[in-house]
Amino acid sequence: MPSHNDKFAPAMIVTQNLGKTVPTSAGVLHILSSVDLIIKPGESAAIIGESGSGKSTLLSLLAGLDTPSSGTIVVNGLNISKLDEDGRAKLRHDLIGFVFQSFYLLPALTALENVMLPLELRGAAHAQAAAAALLERVGLAHRLNHLPKQLSGGEQQRVALARAFVTRPAILFADEPTGNLDSKTGAQVAELLFELNQEQHTTLVLVTHDAALAARCERTIRLDSGKVICNN
């Protein structure tokens, strides 16, 4: 498997003629049609477009959370369109981190325990030290033993960032990562997101309505009615 730090590695994500349809009482609904993308290792790409344009569906397909109706998706050289759910789950486990608009922290676990969890699921040694170091990196060294309900929204999202990056994923998918935050807190979280992305040479794919956040990415992929109308 090529290292995601290798600038000469093949494309990290490739889609060809990707489509997603769902049956409805009124007929077949085309959510995505003929999506062709190439995202390189270490690249940052923003998926933008109006509500209902297919952004979150595209993110779910790229991450192996959903399956396409047509076309192919190749991630790190592996055609995930042909994988069953177990195969896609292994891909997510091995390569992928997630940050969502809703923080999805486990309420009964402390900040430290939430960040340790992905490492413990991998059987990694020194999970506590690694989690504590990353929480310190995102400015939460004083919040290690706090439960999510004791943290502000911005602090919860920083915990979620630390949890996503603690496994050093090859790809980070972020769906509206600042969507639940006020503008000042959102800007701080965005700054951390891009700093960690640069430090770890992660391939970053994010969905956002925030034009400023999208502008920080190297690529902008604009969807309209399920089709890519801009990709540069």
Image: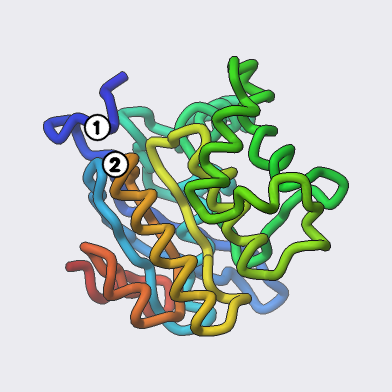
Q: Which of disc 1 and disc 2 is earlier in sequence?
A: 1
Figure check: 181 above or below 171: below
Residue 117 occupies which quadrant of the picture? Answer: top right
Q: Is mark 2 on a helix, strand or loop?
A: loop
In this view, the residue in front, 139 or 90, is 139
Q: Could you tell me residue 96's position as x and y percent?
A: 48, 39
Residue 228 occupies which quadrant of the picture? Answer: bottom left
Residue at mark 1: 5
Residue at mark 2: 201
Figure check: 170 above or below 211: above
Figure check: 96 above or below 152: above
Quarter of the figure that contains the N terminus: top left
Residue 169 occupies which quadrant of the picture? Answer: top left
The amino acid type found where label 2 is placed reads: His
* Pointers 2 and 1 in contact (C-beta within 8 Å): yes
Number of other residues with Cα within 10 Å of mark 1, as a class: few under 14, some 14 to 19, many 20 or more? some
Quarter of the figure that contains the C terminus: bottom left
Q: Is mark 1 on a helix, strand or loop?
A: loop
The amino acid type found where label 1 is placed reads: Asn
Q: Could you tell me residue 19's position as x and y percent?
A: 43, 57
Give me the residue at 50% from left, 27% from top: 94
Give me the residue at 73% from left, 52% from top: 105
Residue lying furthest left in this view?
A: 8
